[in-house]
Amino acid sequence: MCRAEMAGDDKHRPKSGFPPSCLPIVRLLAGNQCCVDCGYDQSNGLNYASIGYGTILCQHCAHRHMTLSREDSNVKHIKDDVWNLRSTLSLFEGGNRRLLEFVILRSKQQPPKKGSSESYSEDVMSFNSVYQSGAACEYRENLAKKVDAAFLGYVNARKLEDAAKVELIHATDTSHRDPFQQILSQNTRSMSIGGSPGFGHNNPPKGYDSASIPRRGSHDSGAPSIDMIKQRIASRRMSINSSSGSGISGNQGIS
């Protein structure tokens, strides 16, 4: 739903109806098992919700909201109307009990007795005295701020995920890169972490021992020096020459 709303086109437009996977969670919120205004508690009749207050309503009370407080209440049908991310978050951030505790206590009115529809009469909680009060206006503004904060949090999280995926794809796809530029970038990364220039392989192979490589100007006791090599070559030449000379003299003596 978040990605669909970020897309903003007709193809990704949200479908009608409150998200089915989210509805059971909303029903479990405190006070949402009945209508916030009249206390009607038949679940099959609680098909409306107020986006402005984040509450669940029955059909009769929903029509009253749409008549007396259309813009502030912003009533939607749970199954038939279109729900976007903001309107969905409103029900999660709101709730029937939260509204009642905030508005009724600040209005200095006691909440009706649980399960009694008669206790919600006009002399106890009239519609105008509740929803047109300063407390209701304050609650509505606070709820809108919470919804905006949650919405921005979801959008920013999705943007970070998308950016990370694009970066990963770009990093693994080398078809568009200049090979020399790729080697240069690898060397730059290697030097930035304290390595040495190369082809991106600064770690020596397994079993590699730098001490086993003779350094310039130093010779291992078992390795022949340059002078020794020259002497061996000279002695080898002398032995070859002597062998050749004795062979020639032998042939002459025979003849």
Image: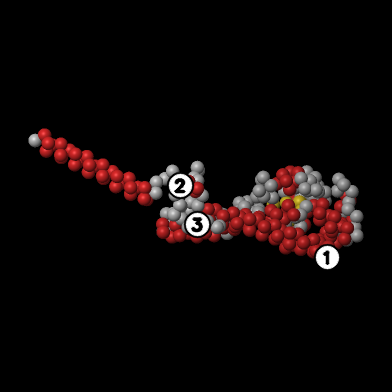
Q: Nearer the viewer, mark 3 or mark 2?
A: 2
The answer to whether mark 3 and mark 1 are in CB contact below 8 A is no
The amino acid type of the residue labelled 1 equals Gly
Q: Is residue 226 left or right of residue 114?
A: left
Give how far apart the Cα atoms at labels 3 and 2 are. Answer: 27 Å
* Image x and y of residue 55, in percent: 76, 53
Disc ID at residue 196 = 3
Which residue, as the protein is rendered here, is positioned at the far bottom?
134
Q: Residue at x 52, y 59 (%)?
A: 191
Q: Earlier in the sequence, mark 3 or mark 1?
A: 1
Residue nearer the viewer, 5 or 64: 5
Residue annotated with mark 1: 134
- Tell me the residue at 84%/58% (across/down): 102
| Element type at mark 2 | loop
Q: Amino acid at mark 2?
A: Asp
The residue nearer to you, when weighing 37 against 55, is 55
CA–CA distance between discs 2 and 1? 93 Å
Label 2 neighbourhood size at 10 Å, few (<14), some (14-19), many (20+)?
few
Screen quadrant of the C terminus:
top left
Q: Is disc 3 placed on a helix, strand or loop?
A: loop
* Percent coordinates x, y for residue 86 in the rendering: 68, 57
Q: Amino acid at mark 3?
A: Ser
* Observer-nearest of 76 and 4: 4
Identify the residue at image location x=66%, y=48%.
19
* Frontmost residue, 221 versus 3: 221
Numbered disc in front, either 2 or 1: 2
Q: Residue furthest front?
A: 253
Under tag 1, what secondary structure?
helix
Question: Disc number at residue 220?
Answer: 2
Q: Are marks 3 and 2 in contact (CB under 8 Å)?
A: no
